[in-house]
Image (cartoon, rainbow, N blue to C red):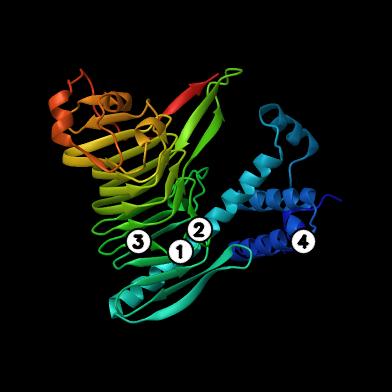
Amino acid sequence: MVQSNYDILGLKPEATQREIRDAFRKLILDHHSDRGGDEEMVKKIIQAYEDLKAGKAYPDTEDERLKKAKVYAGDSDEERKRRNLVLSGDVAREMQSAQDWLAVLERDNTEGSRLFGSKELGEVEFSREKTGQISIKGKIWAGQLTCDGTINMSGSITSPYFAYAEENKTRLTVKKGNFILLEPLKNNFVIEHGVKITSEEGDILVGNVTGIKEIMQDPQGRVGIYMTKEHFTELIAPKGKVVITNARETVSLVGETVVVNNLINNIKVKTRNLIVFGNTMNYNCEILLLEGGTMTFHDEGSGFALSDDATIILENGKRFKFRELKTSNMVGSGRQITYQTLDNMGKKEKQSGFSFDIFKKRPKI
């Protein structure tokens, strides 16, 4: 006898959506690979959950599976992605609950502390002080949160870059205070995979930051053609400072002042004052320097270590390759390069300008 999707999840046909979701979470936890679970059973549980959400009481027949296989053949990576898509939606809803709870405390100007999430989703502790500061302990990996006061975060932050729903992606906003990641290097806290953090009035102080590039099949189905989708991790403090350790692989930094150790591989910076302490700025890095700004490179000998292919763009559209500054002996330890100096030596190019269109798809053969 063929098991129904209700049978697979151990439910009765009259089960509510909440009961279905709770049963799914429990079974995923019970059969997790870390507990010696069966991967095939995990796939069966996920499919049953997806079917019930779509209103299907029974799994596909063998003929139906074969028909679908002609269009798509699942593999372990795709199954993990599907499972994470489901779970990221659950995490995002927990973040919304945290947002609602914090809003009540902010309205009454009271303090409090509470756990959100679960053992299978990951528990995150949120605390609010009467000063308006928010403390967060635990890893955030989906959902959106907006706070008036400073956020002090103890934990890594990632985002389900593969999620279709924008509300499931990780977006953190501070309206009047700072965003601070506490002791990130000591605790190996990272910000990665398309997170967006905005401090509207204050500063952002964190550790290592990375983005991610997703290789996708050509939407027209052309064999051997792939698309690269860039999921930039974005740190935005338009009136303050962005202070980080290393920006690596598809990161966007926007701040009145940006202080960084190294800029590594496809980094976009928009700032009035750039301060670089390390010796690496390479591979498709672009810096938009705002009018009246300065750039300072502090590393000894950095004029030779920094890549020639980095691009400097002035707010008025004038562009330079970094090698032009090196060959002009403008780069040295602690030497400041001003906007005015660059403006005087540069020539404006036609159709030039800095673009933060960071979600372009590029064909890759």
How many angstroms separate mark 4 from mark 1 (CA)? 32 Å
**Observer-nearest of 311 and 86:** 311
Q: Amino acid at mark 3?
A: Phe
- Residue 166 is situated, as x and y percent measured from the top left of the image, at 43, 47
Indicate the secondary structure of the residue bearing disc 3.
strand
Horizontal side, residue 42 vs residue 152: left or right: right
Residue at 38% x, 52% y: name it.
244
Of the numbered discs in the image, which one, if any, rests on residue 169? none
Location of residue 119 with respect to 107 vertically, above or below: above
Q: Residue at label 3?
A: 179
Indicate the secondary structure of the residue bearing disc 2.
loop
Q: Amino acid at mark 4?
A: Arg
- Residue 96 is situated, as x and y percent measured from the top left of the image, at 43, 63
Say which quarter of the image contains residue 360. top left
Location of residue 287 with respect to 116 vertically, above or below: above
How many angstroms separate mark 3 from mark 1 (CA)? 13 Å
Q: Residue at label 2?
A: 189
Q: Residues within 10 Å of mark 1 (few under 14, many from 20)?
A: some
Q: Residue at label 4?
A: 35
Of the numbered discs in the image, which one, if any, rests on residue 183? 1
Q: Residues within 10 Å of mark 2 (few under 14, many from 20)?
A: many
Q: Quadrant of the C terminus?
A: top right
Question: Which marked residue is nearer to the observer: mark 4 or mark 1?
Answer: 1
Q: Earlier in the sequence, mark 4 or mark 2?
A: 4
Question: Which marked residue is nearer to the observer: mark 2 or mark 1?
Answer: 1
CB contact under 8 Å: marks 2 and 1: yes
Q: Earlier in the sequence, mark 3 or mark 2?
A: 3
CB contact under 8 Å: marks 3 and 1: no
Q: Amino acid at mark 2?
A: Phe
Q: Is residue 14 visible?
A: no
